Amino acid sequence: MTTPAGLLSRVVAKVVDLVLAAVAVELLHETGLIAGLVYILTADGFFNGRSPGKMLLGLSVVRADGGRCTVKESILRNLTVALGFLLWRVPLIGWLLFLAVLAFEFIVLYGSDTNRRLGDEIAKTNVMEVAGDKGDVGGG
C-alpha cells in the first residue's frame, strides 16, 4: 500500500541525498564532482526507486504507470537538481543559482495538484510513502 509522499519528507530526503553528494565532492577531490553528479542523477534508479535519503524516510519513486523507477527515469527526474549542483561549484553566483533551482522545484512541487516537481513531470514519476514491506514497491 502506498500513498503520495508528503512535502516535508520529500524535502528532507532530497537534502540527505544532496549532503551525501557534497560529501563525495569533498572527500574524492579530483573525481568528487563527477561522483556527486552521478549519484544525484542515478540514485533513484536503484534499490526499487529508493535513494539513501528516500530509504531513510520510507519513500520510493515509481513511474506513473506503477512500474519501478529505472536509471533512465532517475536521470530524467534529477537533471534539474544536477544542473543546480554543478552550478554550486561556482562561488557566490553558482550558490545563488543552485538555490534558485531548488526553490523553483519546491514551488512547482508545492503548487502541484499531482504532487510532482518539474523533474517528476519530465520523467513521469511519483514519489510515494512506502507502507509495510519497503522492498515491494513499484511492481513489474
Image (cartoon, helix red, strand yellow):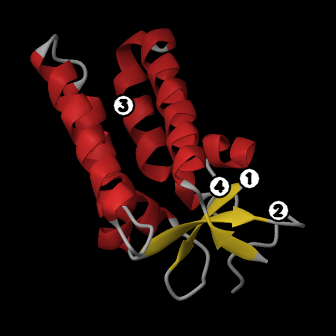
Q: CA distance from mark 4 to mark 1?
A: 8 Å
Mark seen at residue 58: 1
Q: Amino acid at mark 2?
A: Lys
Measured as percent of width and height from the top left, residue 39 is found at: 48, 40
Tag 4 and tag 2, C-beta contact below 8 Å: yes
C-alpha span from label 1 to label 2:
7 Å
Front: mark 4 or 1: 1
Q: Residue at x 43, y 31 (%)?
A: 36
Q: Which residue is mark 4?
A: 50
Which residue was labeled with disc 2?
A: 134
Instruction: Identify which amino acid the numbered label 4 is placed on.
Output: Arg
Q: Are marks 1 and 2 in contact (CB under 8 Å)?
A: yes
* Residues marked 3 and 4 touching at CB (< 8 Å): no
Secondary element at tag 3? helix
How far across and down, in percent of the image, does residue 136 sit? 81, 72
- Work out whether mark 1 precedes mark 2 in sequence or the reverse, and give the earlier one: 1
Residue 34 numbered mark, or none: 3
